[in-house]
Image (spheres, grey):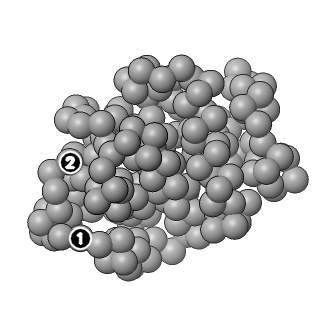
Amino acid sequence: MITRKQAWEKLNELIENQNLIKHCLAVEAAMHTYAEYFKIPEVEHELWRIAGLLHDADWEKYPEKHPQIIAQWLKEQQAPEDLINAIEAHGFEFGVEPKAIMAKTIRAVDELTGLIVAVALIKDRKLSNVTVESIKNKWNTKAFARGVKRADITRGAQELDIPLDQHIKIVLTAMQNNAEVLGL
């Protein structure tokens, strides 16, 4: 069984870009918060955190094979199928159907963490200054955080059957609670 410590070591082996590491930490925080929100048994929380931590671990070194490299490594570690599926299905563009709530959740939070960071960077670089309203105010500005797929955020919230504003609030709160680790 894989541990968070092993996942952290693998992440640091594969990623040099500190912003990408912080993105993975943000997704980890959101996944942990959602594990609590969905009342997932405590023993499974670490797997949810690992999914967030490792979802983009192979992106920097192997962008053309992302996320297959990290998924294969997880298989070699005999990780649970739900964790592997969450990694393989974390982007809508990968064409892999999510088999469990963990996979649906990571699809819902991945892009949103990027949008929240972008808003924080214009709010004195502090997550504490970001609100759901400030995120929504930037939502329709196409030139702002151009790479963030807003349709994926919306679709992810719909798949979780959570209103968009509530989804934004949950992820924002998770990131605010981890602001020091995220450097924001």
For badge 1, the amino acid type reads: Ile
For badge 2, the amino acid type reads: Asp
Q: What's the residue at 22%, 57% (across, down)?
A: 71
Residue 82's disc is: 2
Q: Residue furthest right?
A: 124
Residue 68 in sight:
no
- The answer to which quarter of the image holds residue 95 is top left
Q: Nearer the viewer, residue 75 or 178?
A: 178
Between the C-alphas of marks 2 and 1, the distance is 13 Å
Classify residue 29 as left or right of residue 179.
Answer: left
The quadrant in which the C terminus is found is bottom right
Residue 2 in sight:
yes
x, y percent for residue 46: 35, 62
Q: Is residue 31 above or below residue 17?
A: above
x, y percent for residue 62: 34, 62
Q: What's the residue at 30%, 50% (across, down)?
A: 41
Classify residue 142 as left or right of residue 82.
Answer: right
Classify residue 128 as left or right of residue 163.
Answer: right
- The answer to which quarter of the image holds residue 20 is bottom right
x, y percent for residue 104: 34, 35
Tell me the residue that label 1 is attached to: 2
Sort mark 2 into few (<14), some (14-19) or many (20+) by Cα contacts within 10 Å: some
**Who comes first in sequence, dot 2 or dot 1?**
1
Residue 84's disc is: none
x, y percent for residue 32: 45, 53
